[in-house]
Image (cartoon, rainbow, N blue to C red):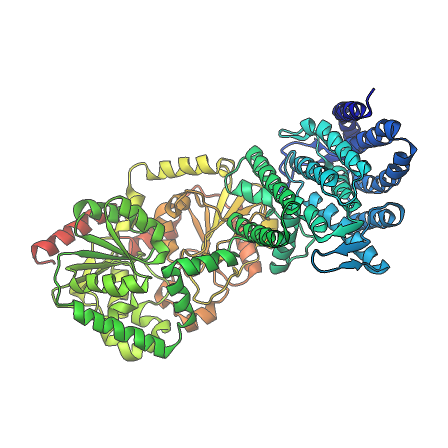
Amino acid sequence: MNATLRVIIYLFMSVFIALFITPLIKVIALKLGATDTPNQRRMNKTIMPTMGGLAIYLTFFISTFFLLGSILGSSYKNYILPILLVALIIVITGVVDDIKEINPKQKTIGILLAAIFTYFFTPARFDTLTIPGFTTFVLPGVLNFLLTILWIFTLTNALNLIDGLDGLASGISIISLSTIGIIAYFFLPEKNIFISLTIFAMVASILGFFPHNYHPATIYLGDTGALFLGFMISILSLQGLKNATFVAVLTPLVILGVPITDTFYAMIRRKLNKQSITNSDKMHLHHRLLSLGFTHQSSVLAIYTISAIFSFIALMLNYASGMGIIMLIIATIFGIEILVELIGLFGENRKPMLNVMRFLGNRSYRLEVFNKRYKGNLLMNRVKFFLIKNFFYFYRKKESQKIVFLLNNPFKQSELITKLIKEYTFRLVICFTENVQEEALHYKEMGAKIVPINSAFSFFTKVIYLLASAKIIITDDCYDFLKFMKFAKDIRIIQLWHTTGVMKKIGLESLEKIYEKKKQSQKNSVIYTDFIVSSQKMAEIFKYSFHAKEEQIRKIGVPFTDIFFTKDFFENAKKKFKKLFGELTEKKIILYAPTKRDANTDKFAIGFKQIDEMLTDNTHLFVKPHPFEKNLIDNFGQFAHISSNLKSLSLEELLVNVNILITDYSSIIFDYALANLKGEIIFYNYDFAQYQKTVGLNEEFLKNLPGKVVRTQGELMKSLEEKILQEQSKLNPLFADLNKHWNKKNDGKSIDRFLKFLTKIESGIKID
């Protein structure tokens, strides 16, 4: 029989050998206790046998030493036997780890031992390195040894780290080894049939195992398989590098782009997070795809596709010329970085290249960066305010019937704005900050005209013009630029505050406004003509903080609270929560929602690791940073009982399902008292003295806080533990008292009263 035909038959036989050996290995694994038990890091829901790599190794041994050896003779057996023996060291290391779960140092010793034996007893090593157009470097013995060990150790671990989903590592190995086999046969300077056939024997062995390992898997590779596959890829790729060109060295690195990229960014991510690089987390490529909504199977297929693209690039490297190689490498690096940042592999808020692109292509973002950089620059502020004042004076001669809504707080006023659009479609203009860009685009689809505030060009050419010529201006926050505009007496400026109450001092009372107090206090006091409140308590705060007069106070209720009185809102909120987070429905839900800090911090002042360890399987903690602090929006995938992804659930809908709220000085407590009358609040005021000194707090409110105050992490954990054990069948009397004093006028009809208020203004009717 023709030798080529015999090789093909033997390779097919290898596939079937692996296919039939694997079930036997599965039985052995279960008897030896080589299993994966479900836990917070693992994807399996039931106990799964591991050690599947042993089936691949045994098949590879039979395929190469016996089957191919019978065709190629003793010379091939002499070539393959040392490789099989050093690979056995890796297999033994993996088997022990699958049974007993050895520590990283012990595993490292096994890999290094195999790498050292590989250097001394096999032809897999670096000897020379040729850079096209430059020279050939003869690598000295020490450097040769160190590079070989580093190569084997890195590639072996890279594949091991990505083995997180059914069929992922085995599928990537098939793609990678097939590409290496093709390149080894067609592109190596000196063709070596032994290398190519060995590679394809390895591919055949994995193919036979693959049906048992693909989703839903019946057996896992385990460390036995992941280490063995990574090790074999490393030494088989080295076979062609004995007298290597630069491209030949680069080729396997590109082919293994998926595991190498995942490993590289995992190391950087852990260093930036001040964690050991050996620590485990749930931020690997497959974890990120799952968190983005990919299913188990679609995540695996997506990574196969990425791996195939890397393999195609590797093939192109061997066709390209010198300059083409450089351009291909640059494009690949650029593409990898963009993909990594889009997926969030580097971290949710670490997107340097995307931020650069955003800076170059987004005028609003450039202005935001510019403002942050020059926030404390007095000269820049004076120039800015001079321009605002004079542009406003120029535009003030214009007249219109426009209603301008200055919008800064996400989702707070959505119900009101929806009704305003219907009522004043052609007159309403929404001037929005970047905080509500997505929401503003939604209003545009509904027919409203929208204008960005953060764009300098838009601000000076459109926003100032609209404000200077408007009939009614509605604001949901304090906008400093209003203080430098001299409005006509008949313009109504309505302060529609974004909360029903406040813990911290605001307006002129705020200690943050010391500079403005000296020079702008009188201007600030006469900006607003009307203040919308839901209680006498808030009315008193506006009187003191904004020099408001009694006749300027409108006790008609705060419009955004109407949602809490909408028919079926609570039932629908619970149904939606169950649909989005079904497994959490029966658990006690905790929400950590701190207030905005002006300091540009990128960390929460809370030890989530200790909290996660304290929480049980019957509890879950959601983390919700202030909407303006996007740098704090992070992924908590490394924790079992903590997350930050609310999916499509609104904050109001979440509050209905929250049993315990942890906050500091946030006004979210006033919403929570309406959303969940049985809820509990813990005030984690770790920086009380500093916050009181720099911002200021409402002394009267502090005397009657609707919850327990804690100042340290230890106190927080103790109080949280008590609240978790506490039954919540009764209404919280503290909430009833809070609603009585702060939510008195909030009854579900605030929007209607506000619209009637606008109608009276339009009609010139005297307002009581």
Residue 257 drawn above or below residue 466: above
Report whether residue 409 is seen. yes
Residue 201 drawn above or below residue 346: above
Report x, y in % for residue 756: 15, 50
Camera-nearest residue between 606 and 394: 394
Rendered image quadrant of residue 569: top left
Quarter placement of the N terminus: top right
Rendered image quadrant of residue 479: bottom left
The residue lying furthest to the top in this view is: 1
Camera-nearest residue between 275 and 324: 324
Horizontal placement of 127 versus 273: left or right? right
Report x, y in % for residue 601: 50, 64
Residue 70 drawn above or below residue 554: above
Residue 429 drawn above or below residue 204: below
Q: Residue at x 20, y 69 (%)?
A: 392
Horizontal placement of 104 versus 314: left or right? right
Report whether residue 21 is seen. no
Q: Residue at x 65, y 42 (%)?
A: 315
Report x, y in % for residue 91: 81, 39
Quarter placement of the C terminus: bottom left
Horizontal placement of 85 versus 481: left or right? right
Report x, y in % for residue 453: 30, 61
